[in-house]
């Protein structure tokens, strides 16, 4: 009689070097698109943003004592606040680097907000967390984070190369969908049917499959889905452009408060990790209990340190990435050492023009195919949180909280430009607003409960 060996790596386990590198590359693949997109939208330097994400990840992992397997990447929650500083009339006369320097100061101050929130939670304990951030809130937030990104996934899946003649655009769009579907279906098939060590690399294999499909289709149709010269430079080595923060009250007022609204997102991520890591530990018959959900305070402190590290050199604000958690859940690989390797490789990539061009050469259609799967898994993890916490879906209070969070978060994301809800002349981020309203509604409906 033979028993099937359970594959996967727990946070404190270290894969062999070859596997370590492959797993690290897989984490970079899922982190890269969103992190770069934030840089492009806000006007921050792309190479600096990439370098900062790696450096902040190392800072996060070391500050948290290598206990929490999370990757730090640029956060969408801060986009509107940062953009408001970058486009403000008061700073219109300044250079790009000076504008970035001003935004940096607000991001650093938001890091201190996260640290203070983490210290409060560490002192108050899990009882306060469960009261303020129950599974009805954190699970719903995870769902809207994943579903609110669905438009981004489908937009990428249908993206065509720039400068395509108008007569070829319809055909190019059709072929883009084919590439995205090949990527999506192959990734799903790899994750379901691959066995042994290969079963832990479905995303990387799906990317390669989609990339090869794009090469073949591009060669046959003449449509340049792959371009190796995104960054034109004669130099192989191109160091990131580092800028330094300049204190201004405008940046503090615009950016600093956003940190409060990201707490439910971080809580959802921590709960997701706790569920999946301990499930793997149980299947591997490990006697060790990975008490990750009680490390929310430590996680927020690490998040704040990450913001300070990133912003100190010119990177945008960030958070631990749901996409990377999805990749870990799919591959059953939660090794902290893999994330450290991913951070180091990311920093190296940011300094070499050919490596950056290779990453940039990945067609958006391929990224879209992967994103359909990854963003959907983020949403599914929200359902997992509520199932694991045994949320009573027949309870009127629970239904009210979930319903309001879902509609505000998703309705705001899709109905208003940039996912910003206009109220009395103020633009409020949909997901952050949904989180705050959900927290307040939960507290209000909890009055008088035993």
Image: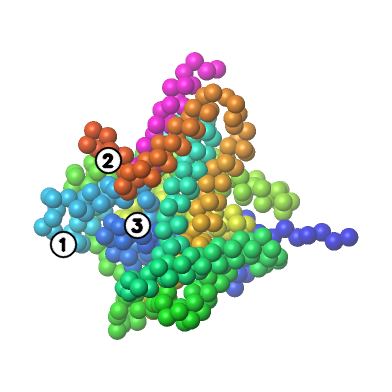
Local packing at callout 2 (Cα closer than 10 Å; few below 14, some 14-19, many 20+) is some
Q: Which residues are magenta?
A: 427-450
Between 25 and 371, the one nearer to me in the picture: 371
Q: Is residue 267 visible?
A: no
Local packing at callout 3 (Cα closer than 10 Å; few below 14, some 14-19, many 20+) is many
Kindly identify the residue that appears in the image at 37 percent across and 51 percent down.
Answer: 76
Q: Which residue is mark 2?
A: 427
Dots 1 and 2: beta carbons under 8 Å?
Answer: no
Q: Is residue 240 left or right of residue 201?
A: left
Q: Which residue is mark 1?
A: 95
Measure the C-alpha gap from mark 2 to mark 3.
18 Å
Instruction: Of the two numbered discs 1 and 2 on the same chain, state the one appearing first in sequence.
Output: 1
Disc number lying in front (1 or 3): 3
User: In the rendered view of the protein, which quadrant contains the N terminus?
Assistant: bottom right
Q: Position of residue 401 (x, y in %)?
A: 48, 29
Between 136 and 123, the one nearer to me in the picture: 136
């Amino acid at each position: 009689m033979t028993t099937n060996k359970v594959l996967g790596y727990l946070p404190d386990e270290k894969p062999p070097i070859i596997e370590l590198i492959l797993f690290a590359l897989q984490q970079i693949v899922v982190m890269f698109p969103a992190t770069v997109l934030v840089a492009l939208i806000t006007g921050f330097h792309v190479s600096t943003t990439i370098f900062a994400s790696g450096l902040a990840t190392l800072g996060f992992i070391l500050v948290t004592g290598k206990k929490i397997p999370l990757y730090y990447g640029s956060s969408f929650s801060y986009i509107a606040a940062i953009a408001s500083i970058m486009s403000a009339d008061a700073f219109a006369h300044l250079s790009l680097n000076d504008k970035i320097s001003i935004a940096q100061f607000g991001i650093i101050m938001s890091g201190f907000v996260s640290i203070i929130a983490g210290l409060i939670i560490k002192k108050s304990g899990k009882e306060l967390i469960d009261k303020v951030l129950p599974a009805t809130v954190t699970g719903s937030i995870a769902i809207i984070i994943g579903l609110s990104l669905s438009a981004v996934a489908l937009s990428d899946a249908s993206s065509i190369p720039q400068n395509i003649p108008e007569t070829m655009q319809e055909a190019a769009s059709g072929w883009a969908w084919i590439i995205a579907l090949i990527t999506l279906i192959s990734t799903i098939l790899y994750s379901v049917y691959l066995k042994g060590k290969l079963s832990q690399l479905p995303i990387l294999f799906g990317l390669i499959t989609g990339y090869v499909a794009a090469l073949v289709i591009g060669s046959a149709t003449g449509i340049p889905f792959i371009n190796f010269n995104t960054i034109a430079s004669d130099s192989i080595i191109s160091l990131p452009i580092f800028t330094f923060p300049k204190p201004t009250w405008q940046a503090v007022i615009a950016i600093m408060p956003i940190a409060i609204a990201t707490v439910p997102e971080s809580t959802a991520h921590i709960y997701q990790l706790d569920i999946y890591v301990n499930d793997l530990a149980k299947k591997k018959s490990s006697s060790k209990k990975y008490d990750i959900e009680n490390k929310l305070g430590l996680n927020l402190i690490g998040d704040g340190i990450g913001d300070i590290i990133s912003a100190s050199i010119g990177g945008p604000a960030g958070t631990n990435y749901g996409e990377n958690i999805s990749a870990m859940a799919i591959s059953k690989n939660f090794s902290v050492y893999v994330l450290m390797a991913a951070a180091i490789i990311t920093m190296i990539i940011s300094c070499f023009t050919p490596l950056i061009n290779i990453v940039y050469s990945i067609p958006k259609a391929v990224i879209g195919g992967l994103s359909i799967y990854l963003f959907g898994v983020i949403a599914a993890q929200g359902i997992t949180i509520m199932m694991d916490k045994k949320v009573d879906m027949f309870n009127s209070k629970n239904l009210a909280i979930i319903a309001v969070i879902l509609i505000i978060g998703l309705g705001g994301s899709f109905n208003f430009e940039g996912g910003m809800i206009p109220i009395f002349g103020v633009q409020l981020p949909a997901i952050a607003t949904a989180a705050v309203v959900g927290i307040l509604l939960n507290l209000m409906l909890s009055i008088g409960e035993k």
